[in-house]
Amino acid sequence: MLRLSVPLPCCPLFSGLLACCLLCSDVFAGEDSDVRTLTQARQHGLAQSLLLTGAAPQATQSAPQADLATFREQIAPVLQRACVQCHGPDQQEGNIRIDTLNPDLLHGPDVSWWQEVSAVVSKHEMPPSGESELSAAERTQIVEWLSGELLSAAQVQRAQAGQSAFRRMTRYEINYALQDLLGLPWDFAKDLPPEPVSKDGFQNSAELLQMSVSQLQASREVFRGALRRAVVHGDRPKSLFWAASMHQASADEWAGLDGQQQKLREQHASDAQALQQALEQFQKQHSRAGGLQYLDRQTGLRTGIGWGYGGAQHAWPALDALPEAPAAGGRVAEVRPGQRLIVELGDRLPDAGPLLVRVRAWRSESEPGRDIPATLQLEFGWQASNDSQASMRASTYEPIVEATAEQPGWYEWRVELSEIEPRNLVRGTAKMGETPSPSELLRIINGSLDNVPVQIDYVEVTSSAWPVWPPESHRRLLEVPENLDEAAAATVVLERFMKLAWRGRVQPTDVQARVALFHAVRPECADFQEAILEVLASILASPRFLYLVETGGERGMRLDGHGLASRLSTFLWCSIPDEALLQSADSGALLQPAELRQQVQRMLADPRSERMSQQFVRQWLGLQLLDYLRVDNERYPRFEPALKQSMQQEPGHYFREVLVSNSSVLDFVHSDYAVVDPRLARHYGLPQQSGTGFRRVSLPLELGRGGLLTQAGLLAMNSDGRDSHPLKRGIWLLERILNDPPPPPPPAVPVIDLADPEILKLTLKQRLENHRSQPACYSCHARIDPWGIAFEEFDAVGAKRSQVQGQPVDAVAELYNRRVLAGAEGLKRYLLEERQDQFVTAIVSKVSAFALGRPLTFADRGQVDAISRQLRRQGDGLGDLIQLLCASELFQSR
C-alpha cells in the first residue's frame, strides 16, 4: 500500500481548517487590524493556504504505521496540560475524555473522536478562551500529527474495504436517458415516484436507491408509454388550422362605437358646434390607453377586450386549410406588460402531436430615446365553468419582439400537446356551447418588465405540425435498410438500441436472446411495430439499463473502459454514453489520460452537461426548499411567481458560468459579477436589462452581492416567508457550503415563547441572543447563530434592507473563536481570509459524492485531499476540478 509521507489536513468535513489555526494567531495579535477588501482577502487567504504552499505528499511503498512515539513525546504532554482538566477523569465535557482515547488511529476504536479533536483545535474552538491556552506552535503540532495519522488510517481503511456505487438510476437519470435514446425533450418519468434524499442532500446516493416491485412495475409502464409516444402509426394525421384576425375579432366592438357616434350625430344634427364638441369628447374618452384593448391605429380609438367562456362564443372555428394571412391591418390588440390576450380554439385539438402557434406582432412605440424590446410568453388553458379551469406555461421560450409597425414580425412556438396537463376534463363529452364548456384556449402574454406594449393583429395555429413524416424519433428507433425481412429488421433495431441502452456492453448472445423474444411475442401482436416495441421495453426494464453496474476487476480495482464511460456520462450528462464515448471505450483509448481529458472536455461543451449543473446545484444547495416557500404577499406585494422562478434558476446559471469560464470555485464565496435575468436585475437594483434570459453582468461593490451566499433565492428559501431566519441560514451555510454540519440539538431544548409580548418586541437577533443565554442552548447556537446573523441585512425575499422592526439592522456577530463577522461582507471576508482550504475541500467533497453516486467515507479522505491540493495549485478552476476528479483514482476505481 502506498503511503503519503507528508501529513495532510483531516477528513473531508474539516480539511482546510489547518490554515485557520495558523492564521488566527496573527489576527488575534492585531497584525491584520486593517480591513481588507474582498479581493485582498482572497489574495491573503491564497498566500496562507497550506494546501497550496505545503509540501506535496510523497508516496512510499511502506505500509502505514501508527506514529505512537511522537504522540507520547510531544502530543500527550500538551493534551494533558491543556485539555484533561475539562476532558479527563474528573470532568467529561461534551462526553469526551481525552486521556483514555487510544492514540493508535490505524487500529484503535477512537478515530471518530480524534477527528472531533482535530476539528475543534483547528478552528480555535478548543481550548475555550480563558482556559489553558495553546501556543501557535503547540496547536500546529497537534493538528499536523492528527492530520498525518488520520490520513494513514484512511489509507488502511480504503485498502481493507472498498466502497460500492452499485445502484439503480434515479428518476431524473431515467428521464434524461430516455430523452437521449428517443431524441425527444419530453418529461417521460414524471409518473415515477420521487427519490429519497441522503443526509448530504443528494438523490443519487447508492445506499438509498434500491428497486421495489412497485417501482419496477411503474418503470415498465413508463418505458412502454415513452416508446409509444416516440413512434407513429399509419398515415400522417390531418392538420387542423385556426386563423384569428384581430380586425375580425373586434368587429362587434367597433360596430358598437360606430353606433354611439351615429347617435351623437343624430342627437346634434341641428347644432354643428355641439356635434363637434361631442365628437371630440368621444374621441378623447375612447383614446385613453389602459388595460387590454383593441386599437384602431388610424383613428386612435380604443375599446376594451372582453372574454367569457359561456356559450364558447369567442371560439375560433377549426379550418381544413390555412388561409393566406392578410396584410397587417390598422385594427390590432394592444397587450400591455402582464396582460393576456386569449385565443379560444374550441374542442378539436388532438390529444398529442406538435402544435405550431404563430403570432404577427410588433412593439409599440417606446418613450423617446429608449429602444426597449418586449417579450412574449405562451400559456395553454381552459375554463369549463366558474370553478373548473386551468392554465399553464406551454413553453419556456420567450421570443423578443423587436419588430416595428412598419415591419411586423412573426413569432412562433412549437408545443407538444401530450406534454400539456391537465387538458379540459369535459373535452370529448360535453358539446360546444354548453356548460361545462369543452373548449380550450391559448393565452399570449406580454412578459416585459418595462412599460412596452405589444400590438398583435393576427394569430395562426396549426395542429399535427410535424416538420417531416415519419418524425425523427420514429426513424431513430425503427428505420432499417429496405428489403429486410422481419427477423433481419428486428436484429438491426434491437442491436442498435441495446448498445446505447446497455452502455455498450452487448454480446451476440444478448442480441440473439432478444430476437428470440421478438419471435415469441410476434404472433400475439398486430404488426411488426407492436412486437418490436414490446421487446424494446423489455430492454429498458432490464437491470442492465436500470442499474449502474461497475465493470472492471475486483472491488477497489480500476474500472474498465465501459465502466468508466458509464460513470462519466452519469456524472456529466446524468444519462447514458453516446456513440462517440462508447467507441472510445470499445477501443480502449478512453483509459489513456490524454483521450480521457479530451472526452471530458467534449462532454462539458455539450449542452447535455447543463443537466449536471442543474441537478448538482439543486441537490448540493437544497433548492427544493425554495419550491415550497410561501411568501407573505401583504408584506412583500411585489414578490411574484415569475421572480421566484428566476430565483430558482439563478444558482444553476451561475454555476454554469463558473464552469464554462473555468473560474475559481472561490467565486462561489464572492465574485464581482452575477448571472441574472431582467427580473433579478430589477430585484437587485441593477440597471434594466433588455431581452430575456440570464446573462453575466458586472456588480457595483455597494450592492453587496456576488457569489452564491447573497443570491436572493438562497436567502429566501432559508426564511419563513415573513422575515429572515438566522438559524436556518446558519445551519444551511455550515452544512451545504462548509461541509461542517452542526450537531443535532440535545433533548428537551426550551423553545422561544412567541406568546410572550416582550419576546415579540425583540428582533430575531435579539430573540436568538435571549435563547442562547440558556445553558442548554448555548453550545449549539454559539456555533450556528453568528453565521446566520451576518445575513440579517437581507429580508425574507433576499432583498437588502437597512431596518428591522423600526431599528437599524444589526448584522454583526462573533464566532466561537472570537472572530467578528460584520454582515455578509464580513462573513465573505472571513471565509476568503481563513477558510479557503476548508471551502475548496468542501466543494471537492460535494462534487465527488455526486459524481460517485455514494456518500464519501473516512477512507476517501486521502483522495479528496490530494484532489484539493492539486486543484489549489492549478488555480481553483471549476473546470479543472471536474478534470482532476475524472482523472483520479477515486473516480476511476470500483
Image (spheres, grey):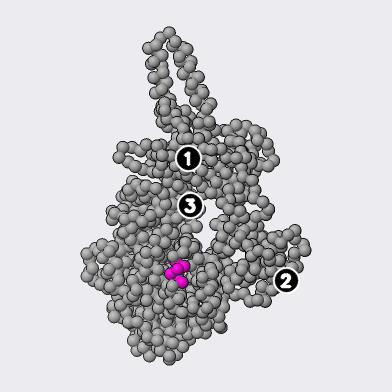
Q: Position of residue 21 (x, y in %)?
A: 32, 74
Which of pointers 2 and 3 indicates the residue nearer the eye? 2
Amino acid on which disc 3 is placed: Leu
Vertical arrangement, residue 254 with respect to residue 325, above or below: above
Q: Position of residue 803 (x, y in %)?
A: 33, 48
Amino acid on which disc 2 is placed: Ala
Q: Residue at x 62, y 32 (%)?
A: 311
Q: Is residue 603 magenta?
A: yes
Q: Is residue 138 visible?
A: yes
Please report contact status of discs 2 and 1: CB closer than 8 Å, yes or no: no
Residue 629, numbered label: 3
Q: Upstream in the sequence, badge 2 or badge 1?
A: 1
Q: Residues within 10 Å of mark 3 (few under 14, many from 20)?
A: some
Q: Residue at x 54, y 40 (%)?
A: 460
State the residue in front, 348 or 780: 348
Q: Is residue 158 magenta?
A: no
Q: Which residues are magenta?
A: 599-604
Vertical arrangement, residue 142 with respect to residue 630, above or below: below
Q: Does the magenta stretch mainly form a helix, a strand or a loop?
A: helix
State the residue in front, 359 or 327: 327
Amino acid on which disc 1 is placed: Arg
Please report contact status of discs 2 and 3: CB closer than 8 Å, yes or no: no
Residue assigned mark 2: 516
Q: Is residue 461 left or right of residue 609?
A: right
State the residue in front, 577 or 486: 486
Residue 360, numbered label: 1
